[in-house]
Image: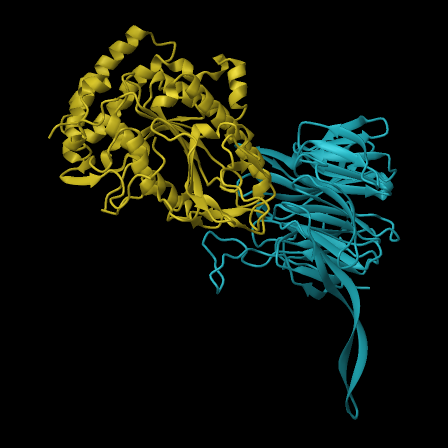
Chain colours: A yellow, B cyan
């Protein structure tokens, strides 16, 4: 079996490589069929996760002046005949930069099951836990030549290494989370420790690690070592997390709020070379007072999203960065007594941009009231196939291997969504 | 809060059926019409009518039938022409000038007659505000409006704009001072401003911190109503002290503020975080307040409280998610716009014909005890 990615290509340490080979026996290496499709190592992903469920009706797919349309107007966009909510004035001017899929139809209407189900691509159940998309990309594409961790997560709240994202791939492919936009405590070398002291300390740690790793499961020990190795690379990029040093004008463009500042850090991490950057926003589960709350939520998303697209395009990064903005589902057309909208996987929207994506395409549609998809609907499995193809991974051929068990990387019965890819 | 009603209780005398959710309701000053607006941008109207009813009464010789008259509210055709939501309305205070001012979430302000099958539209300002008009207040022939665009505007009875104040935050509540020379309004962040519109100056401002919270990414505003009591000596701020966004939570709050100082004189908060908003308040001629609340789906109360007191003297929890309370000018009846039971849910609820169904607001008409 030919491994897809060599340590040299990914800037991995020898120990990591050995750990990787060890883990292959336990699960996770992809089949040789994929060997020729992943030559472009510098493709990247920005995955914007609006946790709780953004309302499609107050964002990408407004139905003004209809029974469930809510109070807001729609506004024209740069694409003739296409409107978005008045809460998205910035993205209305940039709609020709993205592809809007308005025909999403998924299966789960609960957060607890829906979040992992969506982020794992909801494949055919084979009794294994599939990786989140970020972990899958970390495995399939590895780090970029920067050597930075391949799957990082900028989020409010706690941070740290999150191995559970990786499912059967093993903990090494989990996410490194920067809680509140900061690296985990003690992750970065403190100023009181000199570089020489740190190198000596690491040498000792490596020796002890090798000794410790000998009789143990490689997947666990390599994950431990991996955190330290990536910390060493991150050390050189620590200014990314000090937003006080960012130009005020830049911060203002992204917005003086959590999502804006985290999006800005996310962009810096992409610039630095992280393969997959997830930027997370919480608080979108608006079962109550939805319409007042949505004003600030969607407006702030609109600001941060427009700013990051603008910058990625200006630097040319958009050409090789796949940008995804989504939630676990949309929100009900029906408005409850608390002036809220509940969970609605039946008909919702996802925004895509960047590498491999057809700019200005509007894919799928909902009916006049916005209650259900009209015509062909797309599940998250279709979306996974589409994302993989945008990144140059032929999801029809490439497989994970879980021990001796070959596993498709996306739902067997689904394929690429027509019209999304350029 | 359990129901605890030592006094004679109001009695529901009629329930009006509706097909959509309502957000505002008022009786006309002459008491002949009930008017309501909501999430389908139509003005719904009911006319007071007297109907004859028969009542059987047992006698020594058997039973006799008595003819009686009964007051009922009969629907009139709804009035169209607004967009988005019709979320606020106000009536000209003079019973001999039966006009209604309505505004919608797309920015339109309109003045029309009340009665008749097709009431006359006197004037309309399609762009009175840029987007959502949050509230209308009326004092004599003056109309004040506040909107999501951060503007407060003063209009005359013919729809001519007389004055304007512009800020950066959305205005959620406003009222005229009883002297008719000032408009008092509160914004998203809980800042209350006193605007002398003759001189176009802000006389004073003060902060009601409890009505605002930044929850993660979300600005949560709790202020729903401002109202003068005591001839203008007391300003009542009503709404919610928010504790979280998302599935918005908070404590229903009434804050009695000394108008001269801007300081809180007393505050009444009740219930738990799920109870959320006091959505509307009406002042009864006897001096007590009729308050309505709406919390997480299924929760709602209406209660009577004397200004400044620590507990209501009447409380009722069986009508869910009340968004408006209207007091009849005679002070003998009031109306509540509730929400049908089971209004929430993540699943796809379809009717027998397979249609996706929405919610609606039954209107409960109560008679007050003598």
| Image position of A143 with respect to A51: above or below | above
Q: For the C terminus of chain A, which image quadrant? A: top left
Q: Residue furthest front?
A: A80
Q: Quadrant of residue B35?
A: bottom right
Left or right relative to A20: residue B7: right
- Compared to residue A110, the image places residue A277 above or below, namely above
Please give left or right for residue A153 compared with residue B53 in the image.
left
- Give how far across and how far down residue A411 sits, in percent: 27, 43
Residue B227 shows up from this direction: no
Outermost residue, left side: A1
When asked about the image quadrant of residue A385, the answer is: top left
Confirm whether residue A351 shows in the render: yes
Residue A320 in which image quadrant: top left
Percent of width and height locating residue A37? 21, 27
Q: Judge by depth and name the residue closer to the eye, B153 or A112.
A: B153
Residue closer to the observer: A296 or B58: A296
Question: x and y percent of residue B189 in the render?
Answer: 65, 31
Towards the viewer: B356 or A210: B356
Tally of numbered discs: 0
Q: Residue at x 49, y 23 (%)?
A: A307
Name the side, left or right, on which A93 lies relative to A48.
right
Image vertical order of residue A14 relative to residue B16, above or below: above
Q: x%, y% of residue A421?
A: 34, 33
Please determine whether, in this image, residue B348 is positioned above or below residue A134.
below
């Amino acid at each position: 079996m030919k491994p897809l990615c060599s340590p040299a290509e990914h800037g991995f340490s020898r120990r990591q490589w050995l750990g990787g080979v060890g883990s292959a026996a336990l699960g996770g290496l992809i089949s040789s069929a994929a060997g020729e499709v992943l030559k472009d190592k510098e493709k990247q992903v920005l995955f914007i996760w609006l946790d709780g469920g953004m309302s499609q009706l107050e964002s990408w797919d407004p139905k003004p002046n209809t029974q469930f349309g809510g109070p807001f107007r729609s506004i024209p966009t740069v694409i003739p005949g296409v409107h978005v909510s008045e809460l998205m004035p910035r993205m209305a001017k940039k709609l020709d930069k993205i592809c809007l899929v308005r025909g999403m139809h998924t299966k789960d209407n609960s957060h607890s099951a829906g979040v992992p189900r969506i982020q794992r691509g909801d494949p055919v159940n084979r009794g294994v836990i599939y990786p989140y998309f970020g972990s899958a990309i970390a495995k399939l594409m590895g780090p970029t030549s920067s050597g930075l961790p391949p799957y990082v997560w900028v989020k409010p709240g706690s941070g740290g290494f999150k191995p559970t994202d990786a499912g059967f791939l093993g903990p090494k492919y989990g996410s490194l989370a920067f809680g509140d936009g900061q690296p985990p405590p003690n992750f970065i070398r403190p100023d009181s420790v000199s570089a020489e002291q740190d190198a000596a300390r690491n040498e000792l740690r490596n020796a002890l690690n090798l000794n410790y790793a000998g009789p143990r499961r490689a997947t666990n020990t390599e994950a431990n070592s991996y955190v330290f190795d990536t910390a060493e690379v991150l050390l050189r990029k620590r200014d990314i997390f000090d937003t006080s040093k960012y130009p005020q004008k830049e911060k203002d463009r992204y917005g003086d709020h959590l999502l804006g500042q985290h999006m800005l850090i996310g962009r810096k991490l992409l610039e630095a070379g992280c393969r997959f950057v997830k930027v997370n926003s919480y608080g979108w589960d608006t079962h109550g007072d939805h319409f007042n709350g949505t004003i600030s939520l969607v407006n702030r998303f609109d600001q941060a999203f427009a700013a990051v697209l603008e910058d990625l395009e200006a630097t040319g990064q958009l050409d090789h960065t796949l940008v995804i903005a989504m939630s676990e589902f949309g929100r009900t057309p029906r408005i409850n007594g608390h002036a809220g909208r509940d969970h609605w996987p039946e008909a919702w929207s996802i925004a895509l941009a960047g590498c491999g994506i057809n700019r200005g395409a509007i894919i799928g549609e909902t009916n006049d009231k916005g209650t259900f998809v009209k015509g062909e609907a797309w599940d998250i499995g279709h979306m996974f196939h589409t994302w993989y193809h945008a990144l140059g991974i032929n999801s029809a051929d490439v497989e994970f291997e879980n021990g001796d068990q070959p596993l498709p990387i996306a739902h067997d019965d689904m394929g690429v969504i027509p019209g999304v890819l350029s | 809060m359990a129901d605890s009603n030592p006094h004679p209780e109001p009695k529901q005398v009629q329930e009006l059926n509706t097909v959509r959710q309502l957000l505002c309701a008022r009786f006309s000053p002459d008491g002949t019409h009930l008017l309501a607006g909501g999430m389908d941008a139509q003005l719904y109207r009911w006319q007071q009518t007297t109907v004859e009813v028969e009542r059987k009464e047992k006698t020594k010789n058997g039973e006799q039938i008595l003819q009686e008259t009964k007051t009922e509210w009969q629907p009139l055709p709804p009035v169209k022409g607004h967009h988005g939501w019709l979320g606020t309305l106000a009536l000209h205070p003079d019973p001999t000038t039966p006009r209604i001012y309505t505004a919608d979430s797309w920015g339109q302000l309109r003045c029309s007659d009340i009665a008749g099958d097709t009431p006359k539209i006197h004037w309309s300002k399609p762009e009175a505000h840029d987007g959502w008009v949050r509230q209308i207040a009326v004092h004599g022939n003056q109309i004040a409006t506040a909107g999501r665009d951060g503007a407060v505007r003063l209009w005359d009875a013919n729809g001519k704009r007389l004055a304007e104040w512009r800020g950066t935050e959305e205005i959620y509540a406003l009222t005229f001072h009883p002297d008719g020379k000032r408009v008092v309004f509160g914004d998203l962040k809980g800042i209350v401003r006193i605007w002398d519109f003759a001189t176009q100056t802000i006389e004073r401002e003060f902060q009601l911190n409890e009505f605002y919270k930044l929850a993660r990414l979300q600005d949560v505003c709790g202020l729903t109503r401002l109202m003068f009591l005591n001839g203008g000596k007391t300003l009542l701020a009503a709404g919610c002290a928010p504790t979280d966004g998302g599935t918005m939570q908070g404590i229903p709050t009434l804050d009695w503020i000394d108008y001269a100082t801007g300081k809180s004189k007393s505050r009444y908060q009740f219930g738990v975080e799920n109870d959320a908003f006091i959505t509307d308040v009406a002042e009864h001629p006897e001096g007590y307040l009729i308050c309505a609340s709406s919390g997480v789906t299924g929760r709602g109360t209406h209660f009577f409280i004397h200004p400044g007191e620590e507990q209501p003297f009447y409380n009722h929890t069986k009508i869910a998610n009340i968004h408006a309370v209207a007091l009849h000018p005679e002070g003998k009846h009031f109306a509540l716009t509730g929400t049908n039971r089971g209004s929430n849910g993540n699943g796809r609820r379809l009717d027998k014909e397979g249609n996706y169904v929405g919610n609606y607001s039954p209107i409960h008409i109560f008679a007050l005890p003598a």
